Image (tube, coloured by chain):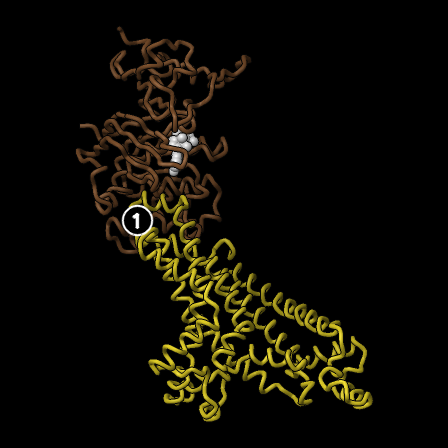
Chain colours: A yellow, B brown
Amino acid sequence: MAGLREYIIVRLILTPAMVLILLTVVFLILRVLPGDPVRASVGPKVPEEYVQKIRHELGLDKPLYQQYIDYIVGLLHGDFGKSLITRRSFKEELLSRFAASLELALCSMLVAIPLGLSLGYLGATRRGSSLDHISRLLGVASYSIPVFWLGVILQLIFGIWLGIFPVTGGAPPSIKFRVPRITGMVMLDSLLSGDIEAFLITVKHMVLPSLTLGFVISGVINKVTRNAMLEVLSEDYVIAAKARGIPDFRIKIKYGLRNALIPILTIAGLQFALLMGGAVLTESTFSYSGLGTYMRDAVLSRDYTVVQAAVTLYAIIVAFVNLVVDIIYALLDPRIRY
Amino acid sequence: MSLLRVNNLRVVFETPYGQVKAVDGVSFEIERGEVVGLVGESGSGKSTLGLSIMKLLPPNARILSGQVIYNGVDLLRLKEDELRKIRGKEISMIFQDPMTTLNPTMRVGEHIAEALMYHYNMDKEEAWRIAKEVLESVGIPAERAMDYPHQMSGGMRQRVMIATAIALKPKLIIADEPTSALDVIVQDHILELLKDLRDRNKASIILITHDLSVTADIADRVLIMYAGRILEVGTVEHIYYHPHHPYTQGLLKSIPKLGSKSELYIIPGSPPDMTNPPSGCRFHPRCPYARGICMKEAPPLVKVEKGHLVACWLYIER
Ligand SMILES: Nc1ncnc2c1ncn2[C@@H]1O[C@H](COP(=O)(O)OP(=O)(O)OP(=O)(O)O)[C@@H](O)[C@H]1O
Ligand SMILES: [Mg+2]
């Protein structure tokens, strides 16, 4: 397994390099955008010397390279800078929002992967059957139904008519304050601290947003699984295995799914990364306080440091997911490993 | 009783451009321990014939008629789970391209071991032990059993494929162009291995090839196939020294000979369109001796000598 270790070490070295490039791009884009963020944030009526003072306070009057160094050094110390609006550190808020988004993304994947994988698998292995048609119908529905619309419908059915699940997403504030912060993910923290009641309440609040996002993502996974399975099952090595009298179920799993997993994993990783930053609509629908709504609010109030920090966090997550996907790749595919 | 008898087999493929008549009324038999060469140019239906014997045809294929009698049982009438017990254990197959016929995410030894486990309910350890033995018998060191296919050369992979095909000691091996994807020296090694197999295992072999010369020192008999039909059957001597069918004669002339300066003969014309094959004798548009009857009626396979059959109007008294 020397090959595998080397491969992982190379990926581990490449990941910070990739993050640094992403950070630099984020930094530069926000600096070259037209307009003065500080002036924009206080409005036109505030006198110039006051604006100058804020700039100085935030270090925005320094030369660009100095700002860049401060930014990178700050990040290395876990310092995201100060909000343009409140002029206070927003690290707490950012991290708690981030943890909430991560929790939602994980729960959504918990819905999307089993759903998409089994629908795609059944569609491919029972091609042309009514199961296949249902699977494809659900797939098409998942891309064509707007996510907020699905969210509202689920709220209406399960929240208002049936009254089983709350219409707001994420842990209610009372629970958030009650559960000690360990990872920042309330569901996980309540479990870790043994507070089962808090756990159950949080789960109830997670069901509808996770179902909404999970269903939307399941369509892509379903489609990729179906296509990859169909392709793999028409490979010569599948005919050869049949000619050896290998049972059908073994062929479908060990020859089919096993080889189809590589493209499926790629798409699942991509979707997960997208979920982290792109769940704005779902978060808004369920008034879920995650990174998506936080970033939206920061953009609307032109709080560039917050946008910069949120995008930075997002870049780190994308790089990390990439790393994990690459490592699982190597574990799945011996051609990469050796 | 012959080990295998194929009776009047007809197989078509349904395509958007019409029905491809890939195998059109083929009959032959194979005795125990016999090696039969199945020779014909590309598209003549050799692989289709081989796959029909194991009932492994693609979904768009249809068997219109015929029987495949193996040990007295018509395989075409068997259910899938009965067939599965025969595949690999009674009849096995070697394919053309060793680069694509091994599962890339499975160790080569497991290809053999899993078959032993499913057919004989063998435990894992025993199955792997035998798998390594079989690999050694085809010239692959036992420690390479843990390799993945991509770690091996084409020639080694084809040895692995042969090992998977002989591991369960089948009575019939269908080898579909087992050497065509390999370079010349490796081709010779693989042919030697097949000859060795013929002598050691006493298995019957159907050796499918488009190259008549490949069959010369391995086959007992040769079937000449053209456009889904068998045109001539005979021993290697019959086919090489007394070819009767004009197509067989053309094939022989087109084998390059060592030291010969004359230009290589090419059979004139081109292979027929299998969705709309020529009437009568399928070869008549390319045949130097074609007459009126050849276009109207297909000639039956008739005996010209003991064990030597030809389907050509030249040899039929009218
Ligand atoms: N799945 C399929 N669908 C449609 N037509 C097919 C299919 N498989 C084979 N054919 C056609 O059937 C005919 C016989 O093909 P087959 O593969 O049996 O020929 P072959 O003698 O093995 O040729 P080769 O030497 O190229 O392997 C050809 O005309 C081919 O194009
Ligand atoms: Mg072929």
Q: Tell me which image quadrant ligand 1 sits in.
A: top left
Q: Amino acid at mark 1?
A: Ile
Q: Which residue is mark 1?
A: A246
User: Which residue is drawn at the image coordinates 34% and 47% (left, top)?
Assistant: B112
Residue A82 placement, left or right of B65: right
Can residue B177 be seen here? Answer: no
In percent of width and height, residue B46 lies at 36, 30
Q: Within the image, what quadrant is residue A46 found in?
A: bottom right
Residue B69 placement, left or right of A39: left
In percent of width and height, residue B170 lies at 27, 38
In percent of width and height, residue B125 lies at 31, 55
Nearer to the camera, A149 or B241: A149
In percent of width and height, residue A72 lies at 70, 77
**Letter of the chain that mark 1 sits on in the rendering:** A
Residue B267 placement, left or right of A254: right
Nearer to the camera, A205 or B1: A205
Give SS at disc 1. Answer: loop
Q: Within the image, what quadrant is residue A123 found in?
A: bottom left
Q: How many marks?
A: 1
Is B305 above or below relative to A308?
A: above
Nearer to the camera, B169 or A243: A243
